[in-house]
Image: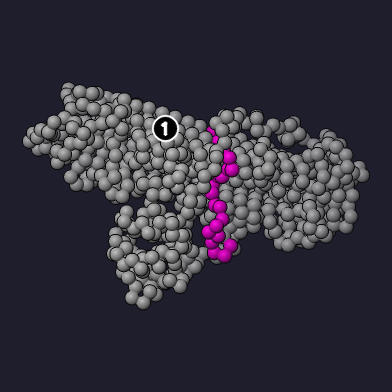
Amino acid sequence: MAKNQMIIMFLSLCSFLLICGCTDKAVEEQKDISKLVSYEKSDYYSPWQEDTFTLIQLKGITATIDGNDGAVVEGNQIFIYTTGTYVFEGALDDGQIIVDTKDSGNVRLVFNGATIHSSTTSPIYIKQADKTIITLEENTINTLTDASEYVYENVTDQPTATIYSKDDLTINGPGTLTIKSHFNDAINCNDDLKITGGTIDITAPDDGIIGGDLLAIKDAIINLTVGGDGLKSTNHEVQSKGLIVLESGTFTINAGGDGIQSEKIVAIRGGKYTITTGGGGQERIETSEEISTWTNFNDRELMEYLLHHIEVSDEVKQLEGVETYDKALAILQANPEMLQQISIPMPSDSSSFSDKQMNGSMLPQFSTASPNPVKQPLPQEEMNSPILQNNRVPSNKSTKGIKAGTSISIMGGTFNINSLDDAIHGKDIFISDGIIHISTEDDAIHADDTVTLEGGNVNIAKSYEGIEGKKIIIRDGTYHVFAEDDGVNIQGENSQTNQSNNDERLLLIEGGYLYVNADGDGLDSNGSIRMTGGTVIVYGPTNNNNGPLDYDHTFLMEGGILIAAGSDGKAQGVSNNSSQNTIMMTFLKEQQANTSLYITDSKENEIIAVKPEKEFQSIVISTPDLKLNQTYTLHYGGILSGESIDGLYQNANYQNGEFSAEFTITSPMTFLHENNVIKENHKVNLFFHNEPMRAPL
């Protein structure tokens, strides 16, 4: 069922965030990268040796200048006052470079094997310049480190990052830049930041690379280990700003916060991305029966544990809207009948619950004074990591893989995302190409408005919910989804006053290949579903609190191949006004995983051959080959062989079948049942063990 329905079954933990999405026109514009970012010739590396330049030799606590008078050394500070090219070599043990130009034009800082450290502030402070260009010379390693605490003469407009720029900044060149930040961010540019080359290695207690108005990267190698966000754009005030545009390169991001985060748009055309956020969703909380007391566990985490381990009936409604453990406990203690429903013994002294095995899971002891689990200590290297201070990421910290305030467009690239929070999260999400691997403790792809999938190969190996949005459109591409709850979910309104808005919520499948393996609902729409093409395979759930298909209004089946196998407690077929025929077979008992089902027409031609990969008691099958007023035979229990993908066979061989059922399709939705209970007066002939039984007309 939908996440909000699951919460109603036990506790109302939170409300969905309802924010209007950006228009389809805005998403279309992102497909053309040139409308988001443009590069000048100066943004790319060019040889500087033949140009006029100023050589600045860094010598311990001071420096020498060989060239024009545009640069001045004052103590351990180097001031750049005029535009031009400045080449830095050597080591500055404790000092700072300040760019504060009085004329117009570009300032180019060439790092030709430079090491700069400051014990009091930012080593690179760009206070004023039309544009500053940092060039990393080939075959050089350049290092910047800052202070753990900055000393300010005044608090107005002071640097807060190892490289801090108030104006446009470009980093180019084939060399290497290592930034070891101790105070805050590594690179922070208030305006446009473009990176067109080089290898940049960063460690920082907070954010890695920030472009306030724009962060654009291509042809670079970026390695980030940060306590905050990895790549970031922060301008939320101007509609056309707050953008991240990534065209190519290799990115390894290990972030305590979000991996890539933009206030407006994230547009990705290519590149290779390895993104880990919040420790990668590695659960540090012990939940085994060995734990006898709970400490340092907040209410939200406790409720999440209960939701995953306790099944309750629809009668438990008094808990709706309860936000904390203590309030829920008070209601439970006042209503012992509820405790019986969820198999929790009533504590005699109201001090704790004893351990109790429920549905194969162990519920640890509870304490009303301290309902928290004991945490495992982290390895020492993680204790010292800027990512996980105080043993874990704060529970209120956003730890998403890729996040945007308005929209995300992925038009290519290779992604490996391991996130504690949602892997890909925005108002609107558009994917047209790329190879994406996701493992997350939360949703894999979550849009507050619309998800549009037009291509690529997405493998969601682990998620709470797989793909979620108010509207989801699948046109092309290949998607494999494993979910602890719903595989694909069309969100619904939380309030009955907004129920009419659910009429506009739609899962539209026009093409592509979608595989769902879910413990909750397979396809769940708090509105409607329409399928006109493509292939959809759903396995699960196996529990009767959910169904392979779950929709509020209609499911119009108009084309494509649909297989949906799972439990029968809340199983649904498709709408009877569909234009393509569908059958739903329900068995008297649960069938084992990999039980063969084989449908043939009256001439014994193969219609469908499938071996569901999970246990099932009902199965929905729709294919263009099922024709009205035609007779078919459903065989099951035998052996299927041949080529198959995800349990769906092509040109299969079927042998040694145990059972068969013959049926005639007289309506777009035909229900079959092993005990000969036929719904909606469909005329069906069933044969089991070759013993004919005729359904009542």
Camera-side residue of 648 and 30: 30
Q: What is the x, y in percent for residue 382? A: 55, 61
Q: List the single residue furthest toward the front.
A: 497
Q: Which picture quadrant has residue 534?
A: top left
Is residue 495 among what the camera can see? Answer: yes
Q: How many marks?
A: 1
Q: What is the x, y in percent for residue 339? A: 32, 65
Q: Quadrant of the C terminus?
A: top left
Q: Amino acid at mark 1?
A: Leu
Q: Does the magenta-highlighted stretch encompass residue 394? A: yes
Relative placement, left or right, of 187 versus 343 is: right
Secondary element under disc 1, as helix, strand or loop, is: strand
Camera-side residue of 381 and 107: 107
Q: What is the x, y in percent for residue 443? A: 46, 47
Relative placement, left or right, of 210 versus 636 is: right
Residue in the image at 17% along x and 25% along y = 631
Residue in the image at 80% along x and 60% along y = 152
Q: List the single residue furthest toward the bottom.
A: 349
Q: List the single residue furthest toward the left.
A: 691
Residue in the image at 85% along x and 57% along y = 76
Magenta stretch? 389-416
Mark 1, Cα crowd under 10 Å, few <14 / some 14-19 / many 20+, is many
Q: How is the image coloured?
A: one colour
Is residue 650 among what the camera can see? Answer: no
Residue in the image at 64% along x and 46% along y = 232
Camera-side residue of 172 and 12: 12
Relative placement, left or right, of 660 versus 151 is: left
Q: What is the x, y in percent for residue 153? A: 83, 60
Q: Does the magenta-highlighted stretch encompass residue 109? A: no
Q: Which residue is mark 1?
A: 508
